Image: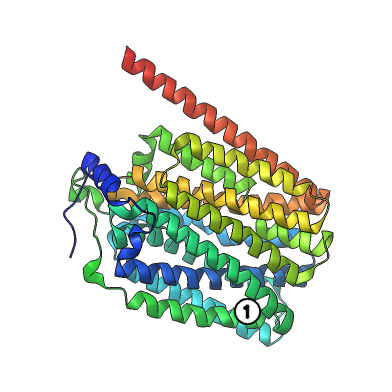
Amino acid sequence: MSPRPQSGSSTKAAISRSTETWYYPLRHHNYRIFVTLSLVGSGGVWMQRLAQDWLVLQLTGSPAAVGLAVALQFLPMLVVGPISGVLVDLFPKRRILMVCQSVAALLAAGLAVWNAMGGTDVWVVYGSCIALGITSSIDGPARQVFVNEVVGDAGLPAAIGLNSATGQLGAMLGPALAGVVIAQAGPAAAFATNAGIGVTVLVMIAIIRPAELHHAHDPDCPPRDRRGQILAGFKHVSARPQLLLIMLLAGLLGAFGMNGPVVLAAFADRVWHSGPAGFGLFNMVSALGALAGALLAARIKHLGRKGIVGSAALFGLTQLLAALMPTQELFVVMLVVVGFMTLMFLTSAATSVQLEAGASVRGRVLALYFPLLLGGHALGGLLAGWLTEDFGVRAALLVTGALGMASAAVIGFSLWLLGRKRSFDRAS
């Protein structure tokens, strides 16, 4: 049964009345299933990513090649992203998720068979990266909007934080398991495990109750304006410069901060010489910090624009400090802090974008947000790979951390100027 639509102040009032506790969304049967499948699915995805990145490093011996693999996973989002937003707004999100999950499971199974048969052509892995990138371009916006359908606007801020927390718990467990599996049985076993996890997630999506979903409608937007207009998302964002600046900051932090696959693989291989087990450990402790950051963001519910910019600046600073750590033990400790600040920023930014986007164009706005974030991630992977190859991994992390801090400073100053201008306009 769908609730009556809410808009404007009524939606904000519902949020303030209903989200008194961070665990409010867990009252929903569908959300309990969804958060569980997010945990399981995240663990599988991170197992796949770690196995894929390590396999590329094994086949080529080049951090730049790992950077290319990361880029190929996320560059398709720059092209497919805006189109995927239309699909998400027009078609049932639950069905979209089932199709995307099926494709991802098939890709994992295919890589498992290929690698087990002795395949050594890195371009096969690159091809899988592209296919997975296209799938993720559709799955990401669908999954984020589906959270809103599962809990409604009232539970959205806490649900985003909880979903990020469980996703990061999966990101903590997945690499730890992957490091053990790869060390004992090779990447093929990790790919096969992820294929099995994909089937499990499909079953979970299937048992979500459609009758209990909250199908949002925006009374301020007539139905004819919701019929698949790609430009609607662009117009919506361009009319809201503060929203645009937060999205731009996410893209810049994606480029200069979210370079873990390249940097952590290089630290494990070239600096600490700890191999796949070390790579898994580094990903695990980063996810542990991210879990704490997501849980705190869920309790805070909404940091505000100053908090978002501040968390972005601290994110860059912690990267700088991690690059300077003299021992592996201190490096691991700093990775926890880096992970914490990463999810404080990402969860708060995602909450801000979703709450400021109109219900009828939310899918299309998120389909712009994710290409900015993950397209930046793709370009950042190439940048980090090139810097690591030519100047060393410590220099790469120092440069990207400094660029992240500079990005936060520029966006923060722009938001301040925009606020001053609006205050002046109101006064006059």
Q: Residues within 10 Å of mark 1 (few under 14, many from 20)?
A: many
Residue 28 at x, y = what percent? 30, 65
Q: Which residue is mark 1?
A: 190
Q: Is the N terminus in the top left, top right, bottom left or bottom right quadrant?
A: bottom left
Question: Which quadrant holds residue 22?
Answer: bottom left
Q: Residue furthest front?
A: 21
The residue sitting at 35% across, 49% down in the picture is 230
Residue 88 at x, y = what percent? 34, 59
Label 1 element class: helix
Q: Residue furthest top?
A: 428
State whether residue 60 appears in this view: yes
State whether residue 75 appears in this view: no
Taking depth in this image into account, of 193 and 115 the one nearest to the observer is: 193
Residue 325 at x, y = what percent? 79, 49
The residue sitting at 43% across, 72% down in the picture is 37
Q: Is residue 369 left or right of residue 29?
A: right
Taking depth in this image into account, of 267 and 21 the one nearest to the observer is: 21
Is 238 placed above or below 89 here?
Answer: above
Question: Which quadrant holds residue 238?
Answer: top left
Q: Residue furthest bottom?
A: 117
Taking depth in this image into account, of 223 and 265 the one nearest to the observer is: 265
Is 143 placed above or below 208 here?
Answer: above
The residue sitting at 47% across, 49% down in the picture is 297
